[in-house]
Image (spheres, rainbow, N blue to C red):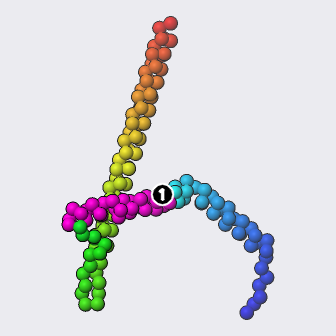
Amino acid sequence: MENKKVDKKVIKEKSGKIIKEFKVFISKGNALDLAVGVIIGSAFGKIVTSIVNDILMPVIGIIIGGHDFSNLIIKIGDATIRYGSFVQNVIDFFIVALCIFVFIKLINIFNKKEEETKKKKDEQIVLLEEIRDLLKNNK
């Protein structure tokens, strides 16, 4: 094997470029938005899971006769199928989806109101400019 001499200057330059590229990547809005979304999504998931496990499932259990979904199982030989846990996770998924749907719906309502307000202001500005121009021409 041949011993190659490593040039420290070249390594420093290349690592400096990589660090700069990484800084640009990490400071881009998309990467930051994604990170914030993941963190908020994780916290939101915990809230929804708590709502399902601590509030909804006991109520549903009372309605269907006091059953606890998480303990529902089927034994086939040595295998245990925990379908109750599956049912609970499906309900959890639908509640998360419903919450996200409602949240996005509310955001769209607020955005629509802002757009309508901006559109009205733009129309008023155009109208005022037309009045101004008419007044100038009449002098």
* Foreground residue among 134 and 37: 37
Residue at 29%, 90% (x, y): give it. 78
Comparing 137 with 12, the one in front is 12
- Asked if 103 appears above or below 114 in the picture, the reply is below
- Crowding at dot 1, Cα within 10 Å, few <14 / some 14-19 / many 20+, comes out as few
Per the picture, the main secondary structure of the magenta-coloured stretch is helix
**In this picture, residue 83 sits left or right of residue 11:** left
- Residue 23 placement: quadrant: bottom right
Q: Amino acid at mark 1?
A: Ile
x 39%, y 62%: residue:
50
Q: Is residue 124 visible?
A: yes
Q: Position of residue 28 (x, y in %)?
A: 58, 55
Which residue is at 30% across, 60% downward?
56
Quarter of the image for the N terminus: give it: bottom right
Q: Along the line of sight, which residue is nearer the eye, 127 or 45?
A: 45
Outermost residue toward the top in this view: 139
Residue 93 in sight from this viewpoint: no
Provide residue 72's location: percent of width, then percent of height.
26, 75
Q: Which residues are magenta?
A: 37-65
- Magenta run includes residue 9: no
Q: Could you tell me residue 39's position as x and y percent?
A: 50, 60
- In this rendering, would 11 be left or right of 75? right
Q: Say which residue label 1 marks.
A: 40
Viewer-proximal residue, 34 or 39?
39
Whether residue 15 is situated above or below residue 32 in the rendered picture:
below
Q: Is residue 85 left or right of residue 40?
A: left
**Corner quadrant of residue 107:** top left
Residue 79 x %, y %: 29, 87
5 vs 64: above or below: below
